[in-house]
Image (spheres, rainbow, N blue to C red):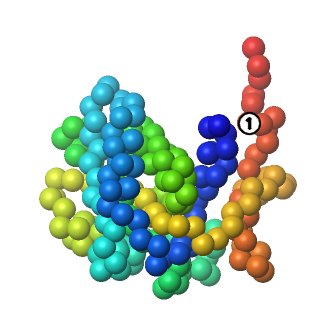
Amino acid sequence: MLKDLVLKNRSFRRFKQDYMVPEGVLRELVDLARLTASGANRQPLRYVLSCSPAINERIFPCLAWAGYLTAWRGPEPGERPSAYIVMVADPSVVSGGFVDPGIAAQTILLGAAERGLGGCMIGSIKREELAQVLDLPVVLNVILVIALGKPAETVVLEPVNNGDIRYWRDANGVHHVPKHSLDDVLIKTL
């Protein structure tokens, strides 16, 4: 059922780094994204795949991991992603705001969840540094990075309490994510 897959698909930030995600799986996930809707069917997104530990080690410092966990610098060695999908766009195809990255990234993450993997969309990126690491043509813009691997943490959904939507970790390292109720997000039914 789709709802089960959505509930399984959380933003995981700690992974079993020794679990290698094969290139073929990354290709299958991008293939899913390629088949999704695209504004005006322009299809501006392109992807860089990395399942190389050496390249992953160079990608990692280009990323920021959890804005609400201000004292946490990201996953420690051994808990880092074993794969990345870097989403880039060609501004000559489309510029400005568009919906394609969200559709594609969510599709990739749902496909990953279906395969027992987890991931996290990361938009806080040192884009120029990452473009250099990946040796990208200057014409391409880094949009976001999807970190992937076998999850090494538990993520629990909680009701929003007093309007506070900030996620947190408890003393056992369990990641808690507040979510509004259905009644909170529905304005009206006509």
Number of other residues with Cα within 10 Å of mark 1, as a class: few under 14, some 14 to 19, many 20 or more? few
Q: Residue at x 76, y 79 (%)?
A: 172
The amino acid sitting under disc 1 is Val
Q: Nearer the viewer, residue 183 or 156?
A: 156
Q: Residue at x 62, y 45 (%)?
A: 6
User: Which quadrant would the N terminus be assigned to in this image?
Assistant: top right
Location of residue 35 with respect to 48 vertically, above or below: above
Location of residue 29 with respect to 123 vertically, above or below: above
Counting from the top left corner in percent of width and height, residue 57 is at 35, 80
Q: Is residue 31 visible?
A: yes
Q: Quadrant of residue 133?
A: bottom left
Q: Which residue is mark 1?
A: 185
Counting from the top left corner in percent of width and height, residue 175 is at 70, 68
Q: Residue furthest right?
A: 162
Location of residue 172 with respect to 87 vertically, above or below: below
Counting from the top left corner in percent of width and height, residue 170 is at 77, 75
Q: Quadrant of residue 97?
A: top left
User: Which quadrant would the C terminus be assigned to in this image?
Assistant: top right
Q: Residue at x 57, y 67 (%)?
A: 151
Q: Nearer the viewer, residue 14 or 178?
A: 14
Q: Residue at x 47, y 43 (%)?
A: 107
Count up the numbered dots.
1
Q: Is residue 13 visible?
A: no
Q: Residue furthest top?
A: 190
Counting from the top left corner in percent of width and height, residue 46 is at 26, 48
Using residue 66 as the reference point, say whether residue 122 is left or right of it.
left
Q: Residue furthest bottom?
A: 77
Secondary structure found at label 1: helix
